[in-house]
Amino acid sequence: MGADSKVLSYSQVSVHNTCKDCWVIINAKAYNVTRFLEDHPGGEEVLLAAAGKDASEEFENAGHGSAARLMLDEFYVGEVDPSTNPTPAATNVSPPRSEYDKDKPSEYVNKILYLLVALGIMALAVGFWFYE
């Protein structure tokens, strides 16, 4: 990533949005992650959902460690000119997530369900013990 770094526009990166040609933008840098799709610990769907787009927020929110950040170097394509972003930065920010996301079961709901299943099993066990 030296002085001969390639400068790309958002539109140049956006055309690389398939499983055979998958680029993502992370912190104003473009990465060709096509070869990494099958090896991505979160599954290839995660990368394909971000293909051709700015995935900085998702990358940071996923809690990637230093190993993942070092791996980015091998996929580096070039810098992305922020002035070419078709979406102004103020509107590119995702709204804060509520405690309960209606589209996906939350971790809280899953814990409650596990507790209810465990209590049901205990109730059955106690019931059989009393009726023997």
Image (cartoon, helix red, strand yellow):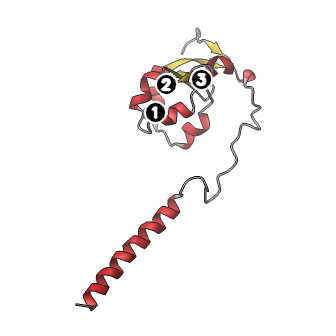
SS category of the residue bearing label 1: helix
- Which sits in the foreground, 34 or 79? 34
Residue that numbered label 2 is attached to: 19
x and y, in percent, of residue 122 in the image:
33, 79
Q: Does residue 126 sit above or below 107 in this rendering?
A: below
Q: Does residue 83 sit above or below 118 in this rendering?
A: above
In this view, the residue farthest toward the top is 4
CA–CA distance in space, label 2 to label 1 = 9 Å
Of badges 2 and 3, nearer the viewer stands: 2
Q: Residue at x 55, y 37 (%)?
A: 59
Q: Residue at x 59, y 23 (%)?
A: 29
What's the amino acid at mark 2? Cys
Quadrant holding the N terminus = top right
Quadrant holding the C terminus = bottom left
SS category of the residue bearing label 2: loop
Contact between labelled residues 1 and 2, with CB atoms less than 8 Å apart: yes
CA–CA distance in space, label 2 to label 3 = 20 Å
Q: Does residue 58 sit above or below 4 in this rendering?
A: below
x and y, in percent, of residue 105 in the image:
53, 57
Residue that numbered label 3 is attached to: 29
Q: Residue at x 35, y 81 (%)?
A: 123
Question: Which circle marks residue 44 in the picture?
Answer: 1
What's the amino acid at mark 1? Glu
Few, some or many residues within 10 Å of mark 3 (<14, 14–19, 20+): many
- Which sits in the foreground, 49 or 98? 49
> Going from the N terminus, do you reach mark 2 or mark 3 first?
2
SS category of the residue bearing label 3: strand
Few, some or many residues within 10 Å of mark 1 (<14, 14–19, 20+): some
- Which sits in the foreground, 86 or 62? 86
Residue 99, picture quadrant? bottom right
x and y, in percent, of residue 39 in the image:
39, 31
